[in-house]
């Protein structure tokens, strides 16, 4: 926002995916980003506010080093936080599972930042649709 730069590099395919296994684009890394963008548009179910809330909440959560003996608890904590916020802002909490799958493509210590980047970029991409009132 306000002229700041966001950097996000996502794989087209998620780990262990091949193009022959991909049933539809929405199940790929870029497809998930665009699905989130679509949810943030004027015709989508989510309020854009969810991107700001998640981007402010994620840094407040514990770091993965605190879960070194139980790393699955770290990802479960992040996923439940995402699900709760998505549900509160009008979306499907189930979408959090897909976003976590995309975020886990990175190192554990980068998961929170990866999610922050995903939400910031998706929110940015949704602005054009909102500015045009949902018109193509």
Image (cartoon, rainbow, N blue to C red):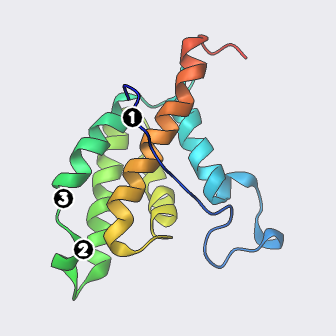
Check the picture and name the quadrant holding the N terminus: top left
Pointer 1 residue? 4
Q: Is residue 79 in view from this perspective? A: no
Q: Closer to the camera: disc 3 or disc 1?
A: 1
Q: Is residue 82 above or below residue 46?
A: below
Figure quadrant of residue 107: bottom left
Ranked by sequence position, the earlier of labels 1 and 2 is: 1
| Disc 3 to disc 2: CB gap under 8 Å | no
Pointer 3 residue? 61
Figure quadrant of residue 46: top left
Separation of residues labelled 1 and 2 (CA atoms): 27 Å
Pointer 2 residue? 64
Residue at the (68%, 66%) spot, across then down:
13
Q: Is residue 99 above or below residue 86?
A: below
Q: Closer to the camera: disc 1 or disc 2?
A: 1
| Residue 57 rendering spot, x and y as whole percentages | 22, 47
Check the picture and name the quadrant holding the C terminus: top right
SS at mark 1? loop
Separation of residues labelled 3 and 2 (CA atoms): 9 Å
| Residue 50 rendering spot, x and y as whole percentages | 35, 35
Q: Is residue 88 above or below residue 24?
A: above
Q: Is residue 16 above or below residue 34?
A: below
On the picture, is 56 further left or further right than 25?
left
SS at mark 2? helix
């Amino acid at each position: 926002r306000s002229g700041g730069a966001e950097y996000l590099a996502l794989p087209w395919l998620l780990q262990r995916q091949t193009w022959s296994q991909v049933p539809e684009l929405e199940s790929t890394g870029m497809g998930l980003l665009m699905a989130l963008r679509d949810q943030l548009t004027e015709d989508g179910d989510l309020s854009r506010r969810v991107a700001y809330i998640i981007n402010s909440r994620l840094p407040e959560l514990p770091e993965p080093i605190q879960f070194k003996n139980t790393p699955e608890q770290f990802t479960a904590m992040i996923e439940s936080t995402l699900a709760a916020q998505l549900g509160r802002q009008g979306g499907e909490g189930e979408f959090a599972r897909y976003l976590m799958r995309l975020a886990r493509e990175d190192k554990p210590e980068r998961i929170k930042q990866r999610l922050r980047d995903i939400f910031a970029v998706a929110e940015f991409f949704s602005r054009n649709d909102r500015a045009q009132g949902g018109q193509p």
